[in-house]
Image: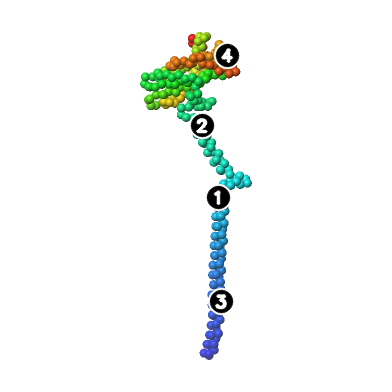
Amino acid sequence: MARTTRTRFWRTAPGVAALAALALTACATDDEAAEFDDAEAGSQTEEQDSTAQAQVADGNSGAGEDSEDGALDEPEEADSGAEPDAAEGAAESPSDTVAQTSEGPIDPADAVQTVEYTIPDSDIDGSITLGLHHLQVKGNTMELLLTFTPEFSSRGAHNLYNLHGNNGGLATPALFDRENLTRYSALRASGSRSWATDVVGPRVNSGETIVYWANYAVPDADIDTISVGIPAAPEFEDVEIDWGDGEPSNLDDDDGADSGEGDE
């Protein structure tokens, strides 16, 4: 009985060992396969990352190149176009001493005639340069364009009213036809102010310019020149009237304006 049992034991042992070896082989195979799969997946991930990085690098290096549809060039065109416009705008912008009107900037240096007079105010020490720019016939009216450029030592900004001793009349221009003994004041619409710049309006610092315009009736007489002046300054004598294509004519009374004539 003992031998039979021992014989069976030794016969069974190799079988068990074979099964154990087979199990170990299977485990090793699974582990190796898993490791191989992980390595293969990692390799594929690295390849994808490298490919993506290469595509990004190629895209960056080719960003400045022309594309067929021009999509990449649009931002560069917008930027390159915006910078010169800004530079041109800065170069063309007028200085603080040049006033802006509906027809563009008015430069006091462009005046055809100038006179200088002392500021008629005891509290403001300085002088004013009065510039005559044009006297143009426009339809049934005549436009006068002047510039006032004060120079004073005190601080602060002043308007024409302040600069003329709080007397706006000293800064109000008129036209003088001495040949026909006629004085022209700025036109006035019924019940409103004159057709001219308000003397209590714009305020300027020393060295800056006030642009002043006023409209008058076209002279009755057939004249080519007329004198222009304000009470505070010497007159501009024999100022040429720019008739353009117009001719001397009267304003009708029903136009609702007072020509200012008769102030002889």
Residue to which mark 4 is pinned: 248
Could you say which quadrant of the image residue 199 lies in?
top left
Looking at the image, do the residues carrying marks 3 and 4 touch, with CB atoms under 8 Å apart? Answer: no
Mark 4 secondary-structure assignment = loop
Residue to which mark 1 is pinned: 60
Q: CA distance from mark 4 to mark 2?
A: 39 Å
Which tag, 1 or 3, sits closer to the chain's start? 3
Around disc 2, counting alpha carbons within 10 Å, would you say few (fewer than 14), some (14 to 19), or many (20 or more)? Answer: few
The amino acid sitting under disc 2 is: Glu
Residue to which mark 2 is pinned: 92
Q: CA distance from mark 1 to mark 3?
A: 56 Å
The amino acid sitting under disc 4 is: Pro
In this orientation, which residue lies closer to the viewer: 174 or 150?
A: 150
Which tag, 2 or 3, sits closer to the chain's start? 3
**Which residue corresponds to the image point at 50% horizontal and 16% vertical from the top-left?**
186
Which tag, 4 or 2, sits closer to the chain's start? 2
In this orientation, which residue lies closer to the viewer: 111 or 213?
A: 111
Which tag, 4 or 1, sits closer to the chain's start? 1
The amino acid sitting under disc 1 is: Asn
In this orientation, which residue lies closer to the viewer: 9 or 44?
A: 44
**78 in relation to 29, above or below:** above
Q: CA distance from mark 2 to mark 1?
A: 37 Å
**Which residue corresponds to the image point at 53% horizontal and 18% vertical from the top-left?**
135
Q: CA distance from mark 4 to mark 1?
A: 73 Å
Residue to which mark 3 is pinned: 22
